[in-house]
Image (cartoon, rainbow, N blue to C red):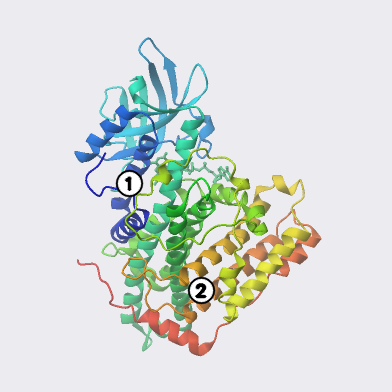
Amino acid sequence: MGGEGARWDTARINDLNEILGFYSLSYWYAWQVTVLGLGPVWMSENEEAKQLVGKLLESGSIFGFGLSEQTHGADIYSTDMILTPTENGWVANGPKYYIGNGNVAGRLSVFGKFADTDEYVFFLVDTQAPQYELKKNVVADQMYVSAFDLHDYPVTKADILHTGKAAWDAALATVNVGKVNLGWASIGICEHAFYEAVTHADHRVLYGSKVTTFPHVRRMFADAYARLLAMKLFAARSADYFRQASDDDRRFLLFNPITKMKVTSEGERVIDLLWEVIAARGFEKDTYFEQAASDIRALPKLEGTVHVNLALVLKFLPQYLMASGEYADVPVRQDAADDEYLFAQGHASGLGKITFAPWRPALERYQHLPNVARFLEQVDAFTALVMSAPPSQEQQKDLDFLLTLGQLFTQVVYAQLVCESAGLPRPGTVADMPGLDDAHIDRIFAVFVQDVSEIAVGLHGQASATDAQREAALGLIRAPHIDPAAEAAFVDEVVGLADGYLMPQ
Ligand SMILES: Cc1cc2nc3c(=O)[nH]c(=O)nc-3n(C[C@H](O)[C@H](O)[C@H](O)COP(=O)(O)OP(=O)(O)OC[C@H]3O[C@@H](n4cnc5c(N)ncnc54)[C@H](O)[C@@H]3O)c2cc1C
């Protein structure tokens, strides 16, 4: 199906996400939920459904993904969308909430349960059918995030995409594809907001000085830029692993929730820093910033909240630290390939058995840099903490405690891929970062060192932490090294982005 050259090319799609995010998350959202809607169809063995959706796609339809419900949030086990058997198939009844494109989608892939067997099911729904009641857009925005109900909606075998465990697996695999898009949308938003903030600050003179000369403003710009570089380096490298994925190499399943949870959370921090600088101007209706400031908040909440993704990440911790896996090197993947495996991921289980290659060499490559050296000390202290004072049985049920550990672990994986990415140029692509050198890596790691110290203080303060854990947590604290001359050069580079892009009015 599809025209000549049609393919799922993650590298090219990442670029598209970044560009759509750069201009407006509303444009991006219509595309994102279309991808989510197509996922269960492309993973299905129902050829008739594939043909139908293919034709609709060619004629310009958009699609949507009906998983969430108002009363159940992340608890998708408890769906109230029920399919009851009839003579000709089934009738579907139930509500869905937060469903993008539900006003006009050519078809929605909807998740529910069979009344008689209690099995899960994914089925196609026509938003224009009389049994489909569009209730409202739940947000006041250009994007349409619908609430709808089905009333005795007729479902035949031709509409069924997946049943039983396959329906569950298709939901998770589709969301895995979507999570990549979220990270790149966040990058696009931050880039546009960055241009606006630095341009505004560089033209603004207060008390006879440019705002870009204030020390705190310079530090905030440096932190924001370092965070943004890291987001991009991590996301570009993790895409190589997605594209290289196979049944024998499922490491992407760790990098995937981090692309979603960490990159989008970092996006929030970038916008927060920039907003401190742009201040009142960030509220004005003729700016991109005003929209970015609220849009950036949505991304960590889509496709599972940060907590849900952190809980997922924790499953990989033992095997990651053990680093006993053997894999061929993963090259830069900017080639024009069709990433078919992402739509044939199969079962969603066995995450704790996925092995990882040694990750330390990636960091050690940059250990001559002061902040990377400090970060490595923190990693050693973290490993010692996990080995010498692991969570007790009681703490293993304390998600608040575990999530703090998960943040520390995430930071190690994030740093590994940032280092790998920095050593692998991507010339001629949107993810290319010409001029990236040791000074940039060191400044990125200055942020990482500070972040690990802050999370360690959080762990120290956890109500259920033992004395041994508290002591071990304090062993992670280090101060970042900031060399005044290097910092001045770094900030000058950032301020040099002023007037680099201005949205036409
Ligand atoms: C703008 C927008 C568009 C959306 N579009 C779609 C769409 O097109 N299709 C669709 O199906 N959904 C869509 N969603 C829904 C989105 O996926 C949900 O927000 C998400 O599933 C979480 O549900 P919730 O926000 O109700 O949080 P809740 O599930 O109510 O979470 C409450 C709290 O509990 C925590 N929590 C919940 N479960 C766990 C867990 N297992 N482990 C740790 N912590 C947990 C959460 O982190 C949070 O702090 C959209 C949401 C938004 C905001």
* Residue receiving disc 2: 444
The span from disc 2 to disc 1 (Cα, nearest Å) is: 37 Å
Q: Earlier in the sequence, mark 2 or mark 1?
A: 1
> Dividing the picture into quarters, in which one does residue 490 lie?
bottom left
Q: Amino acid at mark 1?
A: Ala
Q: Which of these two is toward me, 457 or 263?
A: 263
Name the spot of residue 276 as percent of width and height, x first: 44, 71
Q: Give the label on residue 346, or none.
A: none
> Dividing the picture into quarters, in which one does residue 503 lie?
bottom left
Q: Which of these two is toward me, 209 or 354?
A: 354
Q: Which of these two is toward me, 344 or 472?
A: 344
Q: Amino acid at mark 2?
A: Ile
Q: Give the label on residue 140, or none.
A: 1
Residue most extreme to the top:
87
Name the spot of residue 153 as percent of width and height, x first: 34, 21
Q: Is residue 254 above or below residue 235?
A: above
Q: Is residue 244 above or below residue 384?
A: above
Name the spot of residue 405 as percent of width and height, x first: 65, 57
> Dividing the picture into quarters, in which one does residue 267 lie?
bottom left
Q: Is residue 443 above or below residue 357?
A: below
Q: Secondary structure at mark 2?
A: helix
The N terminus lies in quadrant: top left
Q: Which of these two is toward me, 222 or 408?
A: 408
Badge 2 density bin: few <14, some 14–19, many ≥20, Cα 10 Å: many
Q: Is residue 335 above or below residue 445?
A: above
Q: Secondary structure at mark 1?
A: loop
| 347 on left or right of 375 | left
Whether residue 352 is visible to the viewer of this picture, yes or no, is yes
The residue at 34%/71% (across/down) is 427
Disc 2 within 8 angstroms of ligand 1 (CB) = no
Name the spot of residue 344 as percent of width and height, x first: 43, 40
Residue most extreme to the right:
467
